[in-house]
Amino acid sequence: MGKIVAVHPLDTKFADQIKQAAPGWELIDASDRKTVDKHLPEAEIILGWNSNVAEFVKSGPSRLKWVQNWGAGVERLPLDKFREFGIMLTNASGVHPYPISETIFAMLLAFTRHLHTAIRNQARSSWEHSGDMGEIHGRTMGILGAGAIGLETARLAQAFNMKVLGVRRSGLEEKNVDEMHGIEGLQEVLQQSDFVINCMPHTPETELMLGKDQFAAMKKTAYYINIGRGKTTDTAALLEALQNGTIAGAGLDVFEQEPLPEDHPFWKMDNVIITPHHAGSTIYYTERVIAIFVDNLKQYAQGSSPESSVVDLDSEY
């Protein structure tokens, strides 16, 4: 039997779930932060990630076989060392579809129903109308990165009778997506969409994929929502597109440079909604991460390979 080291403190109910999934395994968690690091060299499985784990993984071969990342993004992890030392990596991609899809629709509805303007007017004690209001019913949504989050967003879009266009690397069709395209169909999707939703991971292929040419291809009435990784978007090109009226507005959860400087123009722009990197936050986060881990751990403890939220180290997501 092996050792599981959790670098986050675990409530008793979560620790019990882990122990039940892998009878006989030793579980160490960060309830005692002073001693948890000394157990890393003996760990076969590490739950969570921090700077100490990063240094440990980089240090060379060990007993470590599997890391369950606490978040979805893995671009900052030393993936080359995972490949070199044969360490499996799973992430928290299954945690986010509900909170992030709800954040996306909160932004869409705020823009079309001018709620963002009403909130600003309220802060100024100003009783003003904010012009003609739109609707999202019957409009076209383009989803860039049709993974778990994008597909949940597509499902919700059907309730608004929206036409949904998707872009994914494989181009494989999915339920609730009316038309799926490969990466080569990006410009076509941008041209047709009233709302462009960026759900893409950050990889060498997607870095700065949304730039000046892509914003120029969009409708002047279109809104851009980025809840994907910040470096998929050229922030300077987006700012220019918003200032020049190339697109109508943007909802932004992440940026190419984080945190966004206090003097950045985005903060004061009426056609921008900012939710600084918390679209995926939810009171159910830990519960869902542990559920992913426990399901995989049951398989691992029985000699099988985990199947949920497994990161492809070559594709880097």
Image (tube, helix red, strand yellow):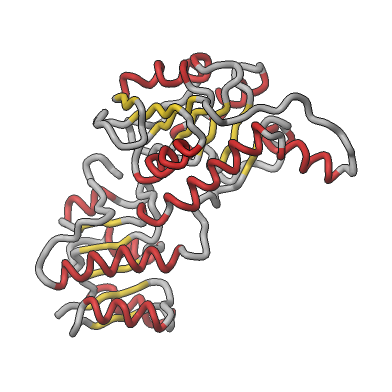
Residue at point 26%, 75% (across, down): 4
The image shows residue 174, relative to residue 236, as above or below, that is below
Q: Nearer the viewer, residue 186 or 152?
A: 152
The x and y percentages for residue 87 are 19, 58
Image quadrant in which the C terminus is located: top left
Q: Nearer the viewer, residue 104 or 200?
A: 104
**Farthest-out residue, left:** 303
Q: Is residue 227 visible?
A: yes
Q: Is residue 229 visible?
A: no
Q: Nearer the viewer, residue 143 or 48?
A: 143
The image shows residue 74, relative to residue 126, as above or below, that is below
Q: Say whether residue 7 is left or right of residue 193.
A: left
Residue at point 66%, 27% (across, down): 134
Q: How many marks?
A: 0
The x and y percentages for residue 80 are 24, 48
Quarter of the image for residue 10 reads bottom left
Residue at point 75%, 36% (across, down): 117
Q: Say whether residue 237 is left or right of residue 6.
A: right
Residue at point 35%, 80% (across, down): 15
The x and y percentages for residue 106 are 59, 43
